[in-house]
Image (cartoon, grey):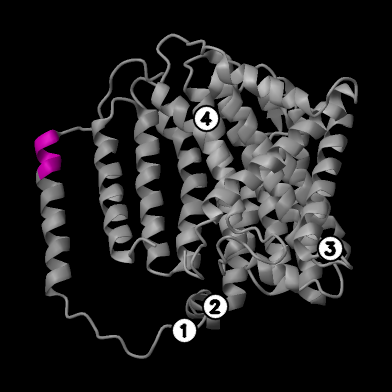
Amino acid sequence: MSGERTPVWAVVALPAAVGLLAYAVAVFDAVAVEGMRGRAFARPLRRAALLAVRQRRTTLAADRLLLGAGVAVLPAAALLAALVVPVGGVPVVASPVGIVWFNAAEVATWAAAWLVGWGPNAAFSLVGGYRFLAQGLAYELPHMFVLITVAVGAGSLDLTAVAAAQRHLWFAVQMPVAFALYLVSASALAFWGPFAHPLDGALGADLSGADRLLFLGGRCAMLAVAGAAAVPLFLGGGAGPLLPAPVWSLVKTLAVLAALVFAGARVPRLRMDRFLAAAWTVLIPVALLQLLVVAVTR
Amino acid sequence: MIPATVLFWALAVGAVAGGVAVFAVGSMARATFALLASFLCVGGELLVLDLDYLGVLVVLMMIMEMLVMAVFMVMFMMNPAGLMPMSMVHNRWGALGISGAVFAALAAGIVLTPWPHRAGRPPRDPTRALGLAIMGPKMPVMMGIGLAILATMIASVVLATRRGRYGDAE
């Protein structure tokens, strides 16, 4: 991508930042599901370490190449999506089409889900992978319209410009429906909370050891990056009183992630077929109406 | 930073290698993703050429498109489970002749075309210029078509899912 040269430190800082945010998601999830008993901060680390050292179970005639690709795609997509997300007004790569790039990286979860479904050569995984494609389309379309709405409101596809366009009023206030839809569809694309069906004994059922760690960690990272992107998209970026911009970005990101994870843990799994019907017949038209309102009133 | 020329050639070789892999691998799933890798390299080429919007759009659309394609490619193949070795190559000699001829014609086109010299300079915002060039005078028509396509998609999905295997999908 064009734009300014990427500083060398970003190569280290970006994975570290995404990893820390993913860890925060895992901690929130541990607290939301199991409460504060014990050491909530240590539990995700303990689980990760256990998975990392455990030996892999293998399935008969698994496609190791595609399985490995699928497992790696999720964390890689989270990193690629994070490239264009500004923290305190400064992204690693200043792209004039950052919103589209972010969406392209998010859609890579489809590839991850299908590959992880196909790879083990096992029935339930395969069903989970195929199902997620049908679900993914219903999640992605409202998500895409929401991103288009934001771009129309800001008059730019550059996430930094989008944050700057909210000097007077946050987009979360200007287009509340789009904000709500963003949170729902972003959780769904990371199969989180009420949208976690793919993980219920299907996707990832045949993953073990380091594969499982990468897949589940990548899922946390995907949600973390989607939460971090909500800040420049809807919450005014790093703008705020007293504190410097990067701190505000971090505070807002953690607030969004906490809200997503705790709300996700309180809501039961939605019945998939009902949600898909609602996505096609309610969410997409509602997203289009919000787009119309923003386009007319802008 | 890696010079653009190196990136260009690396992606070009990657794109061709992905295309070759489609016909060399023994499973339809692998062929699908080899093709996707090839397309992603082409998207990367557009990014190297500073066509940001087109490049990112190719990446976005190709991921979505190839994942939907994967369903159909696997579904319509000879051994859908992919348990037996398969080959994407059919009619080997005829195909070689046709593809060789097409390649020669296209390559000759590159050499023989009197390419125009650049007039003017690249616009400040290529995305905007591209949008105006494609849709400028025909914006309402394009918007109408876009809505019609979307309405068709939604209508066909709604019609298709009215009755499922387990009764009505409410």
Q: Which residue is mark 2?
A: B128
**Secondary structure, magenta segment, majority class:** helix
Say whether mark 4 and mark 3 are on the same chain: yes
Front of the two marks 4 and 1: 4
Give the tally of numbered discs: 4
N-terminal-most mark, 1 or 2: 1
N-terminal-most mark, 3 or 4: 4
- Secondary structure beneath disc 2? helix
Q: Which mark is residue A175?
A: 3
Start-end of magenta stretch = B92-96
Q: Which mark is residue A71?
A: 4
Neighbour tally class for label 1: few under 14, some 14-19, many 20 plus, Cα within 10 Å: few
Q: CA distance from mark 1 to mark 2?
A: 9 Å
Identified at 57% across, 13% down, the residue is A54
Q: Could you tell me which chain the residue with mark 2 belongs to? A: B
Q: CA distance from mark 4 to mark 1?
A: 41 Å
